[in-house]
Amino acid sequence: MITMKEWMELVDYKITEGGDFGWDCYGSNSYQLSSWNGLHDRGGWSFNVVFSTKSQKVYEVAVCDYTNKRAYRMINSDYVKKYNKEAKTRGEMLNQAWDDVDYVDLEVDDDFIQKCLAIKAGEVYDTRVSVPIDLPDNVMLALMKMAHERDITFNQLVEEILKEYISLNNKL
């Protein structure tokens, strides 16, 4: 999970709003900060962070790209179940960012950071989601050899394998 320092650097230390986070899932010391450029459409974005005022632990970060009607977030894995449970109790839509736009949940810090930097700069960015995988060394080596033999990158091969796996499971 990204840190407060990383989030503050993403927003160039420009805070536009803040207040107590109104839900209980992150504890009584949770606070939310926002950095919004003031635009709701073309060129518009907002960055949000929920964190502990005591420990500075980050519970959740989100970015809203109003230009492309996309929203991304990361919820600290230690709190996802608590967040989901409270959202259901409150009758809230788990994934809704605004209107008809749902959050895309991310798991890789760098994926979130790269999307944020591009959104803030008004640049085109990769909308795919990075997925962390942990492979034993022997499997990694075998896949690297396979990718080399096919003259593609390791990442391309893994992406193909994951797409095939998902496709097969969707047919079941």
Image: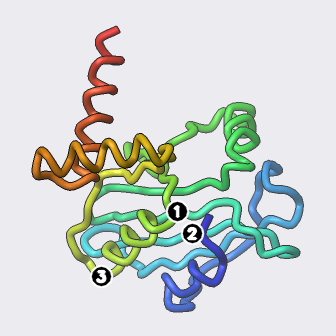
34 or 56, nearer to the observer: 56
Color encoding of the figure: rainbow
Give the x, y percent position of residue 112: 45, 65
Q: Which of marks 2 and 1 is nearer the N terminus?
A: 2
Residue 48: image tag: 2
Secondary structure of residue under mark 2: strand
Residue 121 has which mark? 3
Amino acid type for the residue under numbered disc 3: Ala
User: Label 3 to label 1, Cα distance in Å?
Assistant: 16 Å
Q: Is residue 49 above or below residue 89?
A: below
On the image, the x and y values in percent for residue 37 come to 42, 81
At label 2, which amino acid type do we have?
A: Asn
Sequence order check: which comes first, mark 3 or mark 2?
A: 2
Q: Which residue is drawn at 44% across and 43% down?
A: 138
Q: Earlier in the sequence, mark 3 or mark 1?
A: 1
C-beta proximity under 8 Å, tags 2 and 1: yes
For disc 1, the marked residue is: 62
